[in-house]
Image (spheres, helix red, strand yellow):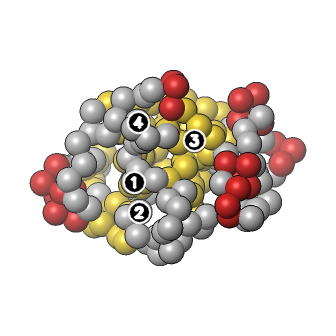
Amino acid sequence: MNFLKTDIAGVYIIEPVVFGDHRGYFMETFRQDLFDAAVGPVGFVQENESYSRYGVVRGLHFQAEPFAQAKLVRVIRGRVWDVALDIRPGSPTFGRHIGVELSGENHRQFFVPRGFAHGFAVLSEDAVFAYKVDNVYAPQSERSIRFDDPALGIAWPVPAADRICSEKDLRAPSWHDVFPASN
């Protein structure tokens, strides 16, 4: 596996080695020893999967302490634009984001550490999205930031007219409402 550092400390793009032939392919999607050596120890405790159709935008979601979560995400089928937003006050990259295309074809994975909000937009007809987390879901700690807040400058590749969002995501507070000191 290749662990590619990004412009934001702690966020990695992971490219597995894919062995393919006329029958199909094989790849390791996770190996604890390699992950620990490249990223550091993270104890994943839950794995989730979602299905979405074209235009769905999910996010930007995070859990507050003490239930913050690191995520290792990948797309099994389809294509998504995946975004990690640094919400660590005091971080030199606080308020900055990084986006990457994940697909069932490129097999890339994205590691989003604790202290980040996360979201994605589906670019293909549909997508199956899988992710490991290092802390269980705690509804009382669930938080979100409005995905299309202009203050964030995220260029979502799905046209606004095609976006499909949950009511909860559409009602999410703005960046400045969640982090008023960032004004």
Q: Amino acid at mark 2?
A: Val
User: Considering the numbered disc 3 on the image, is that residue within a helix, a strand or a loop?
Assistant: strand
| First-in-chain label (1 vs 3) | 3
Residue beneath disc 4: 67
Query: What amino acid is found at the position of numbered circle 1 in the picture?
Result: Pro
Q: CA distance from mark 4 to mark 3?
A: 13 Å
**Percent from the top left, x then y, of residue 102?**
49, 53
Instruction: Give the CA distance from mark 2 to mark 4.
Output: 19 Å
Q: Is residue 64 above or below residue 35?
A: above
Tell me which label, 4 or 1, sits earlier in the chain: 4
In the rendering, which numbered label is found on residue 113? Answer: 1
Apparent side of residue 158 relative to residue 100 in the rendered image (left or right):
right
Helix, strand or loop under label 1: loop
- Measure the alpha-carbon separation of dots 3 and 2: 16 Å
Real-space CA distance between mark 4 and mark 1, rounded to the nearest whole angstrom? 13 Å
Task: Please state the horizontal and vertical placement of residue 177, each as a whole percent of the image.
Answer: 73, 49
> Of the numbered discs in the image, which one, if any, rests on residue 61?
3
